[in-house]
Amino acid sequence: MLSYQHAYHAGNLADVHKHALLAQALDYLTQKNKPLTYLETHAGRGLYDLTSAEAQKTGEAAQGISFVSQWFGKDHPYTRALHAIREKRGPNAYPGSPLIAQTLLRESDRLHLAELHPQEHAALEFTMSAAGNAKVYQQDGFALAQSLCPPDPRRGLILIDPSWELKEDYARMPRFVDTLAKKWNVGIVMIWYPILTEPQHKPMIAAIRQSQSEALIHEVTFPPARKGHRMVGSGMVVLNPPWGLADHAQALTKRFKSL
């Protein structure tokens, strides 16, 4: 969806949920001394300024990472990534998932990042320009994933995080996930989705549960960011979840229930 720009929502509670689990999964993968591949289908610009006009307009970061950063200890990989990025980019920087991944991964690992929006793609290229192990594509992320999977190295993870402004995304996701799982049966597949006041995600999740019965499906709820805001929660589907990720997800459940 070429109208969507994540700058208005960077660092919100859904980002906290998504990025905390992503960081844990990447941390697990890097414990083994073997290279891996990271793919992302809808990468965004990779870096956001929480003092920008967009962030200030919605106030979502103030209710998100700025409010709940104490949830994560200094040794948590999410915290480590945030601190490393802010040391380089300033205290108001917030990383998108591509920059979190690049920060936690090693030079021997490979990153493939798709972003179709022209402005977001240009910003992503600039953000990742110093990363010699990252390749940025201006193309449809679903098509890129189909063309690259199974990737080389074969170990790794893909994050699928569309805007969900197109209803077709909900309908296509179960089939896409099944195809991806067949082509890359050892890959960790992570899908983020919003939980809205109209539960559009439920048929999609039911279909994924039916075909991928061993997937980890984790959902959290939280108060709307402002009156009339439709997003009231965040969900993650994880195929081939790494050991211990379900426990980390349960710990997050308790945190979100405290809001």
Image: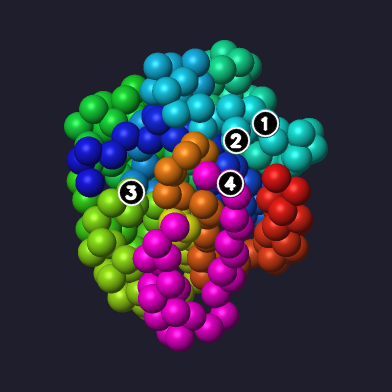
Q: Nearer the viewer, residue 41 or 226?
A: 226
Whole-Å distance between the Cαs marked 2 and 1? 5 Å
* Residue 159 percent coordinates (x, y): 44, 54
Observer-nearest of 152 and 258: 258
Above or below for 94 versus 116: above
Element type at mark 2: loop
Alpha carbon separation for disc pair 2 and 4: 11 Å
Q: Is residue 4 depicted above or below 179 in this figure?
A: above
Q: CA distance from mark 1 to mark 3?
A: 24 Å
Q: Nearer the viewer, mark 2 or mark 4?
A: 4
Q: Are marks 2 and 1 in contact (CB under 8 Å)?
A: yes
Q: Amino acid at mark 1?
A: Phe
Q: Pinpoint residue 221: horizontal percent, then vertical percent.
A: 59, 55
Residue picked out by circle 2: 64
Q: Residue at x 24, y 56 (%)?
A: 166
Q: Earlier in the sequence, mark 2 or mark 3?
A: 2
Which amino acid lies under the numbered mark 2 shown in the image of this protein? Gly
For the residues marked 2 and 3, what is the alpha-carbon distance in whole angstroms?
19 Å
Q: Position of residue 112 (x, y in %)?
A: 36, 46
Q: For the residue marked with disc 4, what is the amino acid? A: Pro
Where are the magenta residues, as a range? 197-224
Mark 1 residue crowding within 10 angstroms, few (<14) / some (14–19) / many (20+):
some
Q: Are marks 1 and 3 in contact (CB under 8 Å)?
A: no
The mark closer to the camera, 1 or 3, is 1
Q: Which mark is residue 67?
A: 1
The residue at 45%/29% (across/down) is: 58
- The residue pinned by badge 3 equals 163
Q: Is residue 30 visible in this depiction of the protein?
A: no
Which badge, 2 or 4, is on the more N-terminal residue?
2
